[in-house]
Amino acid sequence: MAAGLFRSGATGRQLAYAIVAPLLVLAILGLLWQWVALTIGSILPPLGKVGGEFIERPGFYVFHLGVTLYAGLIGFAIGALSGVLLAGCIVWFPFLGPALVPVALMLNATPIVAIAPALIVAFGFNAIPHIIVATIAAFFPMLINAITGLRSVDRGALEVFDAMSASRGEVFLRLRLPSSLPYLFSGAKVAVTAAMIGAIVSEFTGTTEGLGAVIVIATSFLNLTQMWAAIFTSILATLLLIGVINLAERLIVRW
Amino acid sequence: MYAKLTSVPGPVAAMRETEEARGDSPAGLGAAGDRIEIRGVNRIYQGNGREVHALSDINLHIRRGEFVTLFGPSGCGKSTLLRIIAGLDRQSSGEVRLFKQDPLDASRSKNIAWIPQSSSLLPWLTIRRNVELSARLNRRADRLRLTARKPERPMQVLRELGLGEFADKRPAQLSGGMRQRASIARGFVQGAPMMLMDEPFSALDELTRDALQLRLLDLWEKHRKTVIFVTHSAAEAVLLSDRVVVMTSRPGRIHSIIDIDLPRPRPAGIEDSPAFGELVRRVKATLRAGWEGA
């Protein structure tokens, strides 16, 4: 956001609002956190302790983050791609919508915590169950955003295409797909977050690797510092992924 | 006085009078293929168990190279009629022939340039790429030489519309008036013999609108396309057109057709002339008479 403001020649007040305001909110939250941690230590560890945990064992968190990222990113890629492809089919063949959207809704309503153990029984102790859970989590937001985007076409532009008898393929590739890009990027940001959460939740069972497993094991040992260090790792990683998607959006959606 | 009215306000009979006067009636048809013919067109929409007559018994002939405006209040069916002519909608009954072609065939041959109400430029393309759009769509028509169109040079048309230096900008970098000019340029570059314009200036402020009307007139004088233009503005209709088709609503029908016998090219300041003012008053009075009689 701040970069956009610099580019568009924003005023000093706007810049201050864009940069200072979120920092101020974070500072207030940090102070609140510290107050709770120092008053009731069993709820939250002091932030300094969590930071120290990172500095002491960076390799530990990087390894487990790598495991989670592997499942989360593959799941995101498969879920996002299949969501866009299915949305394309639904927009191309409108009769598919009533048949497939309820199934997608059902998939979205599936409690992923509950199906993770079932997937481990089916696929064994490997990355596949975690990838499947991340895929399910990423699929729906991408599908819905892609359907909305592909249908949200400027009516006048569509008439211009129709008046020239443009083929359905031309309408799709030259009009619908580019028009939907802002929606696809919005969907991707929600989907990558969902995929990471899905991967972490699926690691609660059947594995000793990944940030989800670290959180569960640390909780069972009442190690609040390690648990929060793992949670912060996942938050930072997800924010970084959203940042990468934002950057790609800025480079591609330049209108 | 610049002109005299050749048709008087009144029902469709007035239109027939005008046509017969110039030997333009179906009976006196010479070169039927050299004009747009709309015969007995009706458009009925079904909704909530009842029928809505959007258009009723529309008869209209437009000669090649003529600038005709469909004028009337909201809901009189002028945009519906334009969409039927463009092949974007189908009539319930009646016949539409565009220089011998069915609207869908004309559309397949890229012989119709459609200029919508909003500029509807593709925001991800530069202005130049936007106006070149017709060359990238439905190339089959060009390959098989189905089309009567003669594409214009994009940069030349952009320059004619004062957009030469903005060719590499994106639509978001242009003002509303410039975007609308680019939309008109897209239509001209297509090179189609027919241009159908659906209230293209309605969203613009008065000054921009005035400037764009003059630009459009200049461009039309050079290219002499057959233009069917839809508007709510009587002054715009008189300034641009050879004939104004006054439509009334419930159901949408042609009340009368008024010849605009002002000189071409329109001289500067023509809007201030008594003849122009008289014609605008006549067009408005005709509309009012149609309204009261409806």
Image (cartoon, coloured by chain):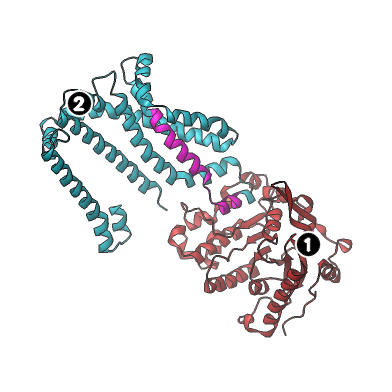
- Pick the front one: A86 or A140: A140
Which residues are drawn in magenta? Answer: A135-161
Q: Circle 2 sits in a helix, a strand or a loop, which is it?
A: helix
Q: Residues within 10 Å of mark 2 (few under 14, many from 20)?
A: some
Q: Residue tagged by mark 1? A: B60
Q: Position of residue B92 (x, y in %)?
A: 76, 49
Q: What chain letter is assigned to the residue under label 2?
A: A
- Pick the front one: B170 or A42: A42
- Number of the label disc, if any, that sits on residue B242: none
- Seen at 69% across and 50% down, the residue is B89
- Pick the front one: A157 or A137: A137
Which residue appears farthest toward the front when viewing the image? A40
Q: State left or right for residue B114 relative to residue B165.
A: right
Q: Position of residue A53 (x, y in %)?
A: 12, 32
Supply the letter of whichever chain is red: B
At label 1, the amino acid type is Leu
Q: Residue tagged by mark 2? A: A219
**Res B144 quadrant in image:** top right
Which residue appears farthest toward the right when viewing the image? B27
Q: State left or right for residue B124 relative to residue B66.
A: left
For marks 1 and 2, give the CA distance: 81 Å
Marks 1 and 2: same chain? Answer: no
Q: What chain letter is assigned to the residue under label 1?
A: B
Q: Is residue B263 visible?
A: no
Q: Position of residue A235 (x, y in %)?
A: 25, 37
- Seen at 75% across and 71% down, the residue is B292
Supply the letter of whichever chain is cyan: A
Marks 1 & 2, CB-CB < 8 Å contact: no
Q: Residues within 10 Å of mark 1 (few under 14, many from 20)?
A: many
Task: Single out the mark in the foreground, 1 or 2.
Answer: 2
